[in-house]
Image: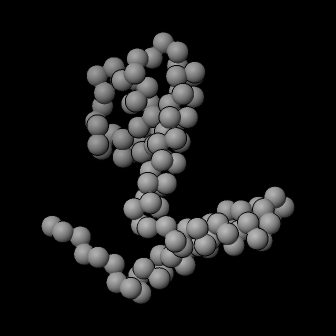
């Protein structure tokens, strides 16, 4: 089943929500209004694919940091165990068990 393309109205809504999130995430104490305006213009000019790449990159960086923290907390754990620990944290216990069931080492 192919996903339908968003309507122009939906794209405008998404763009407005994106701009709102960008501005809200900036701290007025350390980001000038000029810098905020420049960043919003940059995001407005980005293609959806470029925005998706940025989001994916940030997600992957967060995952790497989370897994590094887990490795530090569980130095004896295997890579597979670290991945399961991360997935459990990321998904939550209920969804993790629904997707993966009980693991053999549990």
Q: Residue sitting at 64 percent across and 66 percent down?
A: 39
Which residue, as the protein is rendered here, is positioned at the far right? 29
Colouring mode (rainbow / by chain / secondary structure / one colour):
one colour
Q: The N terminus appears in which quarter of the rendering?
A: bottom left
Depth check: 78 or 20 in front? 20
54 versus 86 height, above or below: below
14 versus 27 height, above or below: below
28 versus 92 height, above or below: below
**Residue 35 found in image quarter:** bottom right
Q: Is residue 82 left or right of residue 6?
A: right
Q: Is residue 93 left or right of residue 21?
A: left
Which residue, as the protein is rendered here, is positioned at the far left? 1
Q: Residue sitting at 48 percent across and 55 percent down?
A: 55
Q: Position of residue 73 (x, y in %)?
A: 57, 22
Q: Residue sitting at 49 percent across and 39 percent down?
A: 63
Q: Residue sitting at 36 percent across and 41 percent down?
A: 96
**Residue 7 found in image quarter:** bottom left
Which residue, as the protein is rendered here, is positioned at the far top? 76
Q: Position of residue 72 (x, y in %)?
A: 57, 21
Q: Position of residue 106 (x, y in %)?
A: 35, 23
Depth check: 37 or 28 in front? 37
Which residue, as the protein is rendered here, is positioned at the far bottom? 9
Does any portion of residue 67 appear in the rendered image? yes
Does any portion of residue 18 appear in the rendered image? no
Q: Is residue 98 left or right of residue 48?
A: left
- Marks counted in the figure total 0
84 versus 17 height, above or below: above
């Amino acid at each position: 089943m192919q996903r339908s393309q968003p309507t122009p109205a939906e794209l405008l809504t998404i763009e407005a929500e994106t701009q709102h999130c960008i501005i809200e995430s900036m701290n007025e104490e350390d980001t000038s209004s000029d810098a905020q305006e420049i960043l919003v213009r940059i995001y407005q000019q980005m293609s959806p694919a470029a925005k998706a790449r940025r989001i994916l990159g940030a997600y992957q960086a967060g995952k790497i940091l989370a897994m590094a923290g887990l490795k530090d907390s569980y130095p004896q754990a295997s890579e597979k165990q670290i991945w399961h620990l991360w997935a459990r944290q990321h998904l939550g216990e209920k969804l993790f068990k629904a997707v993966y069931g009980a693991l053999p080492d549990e």
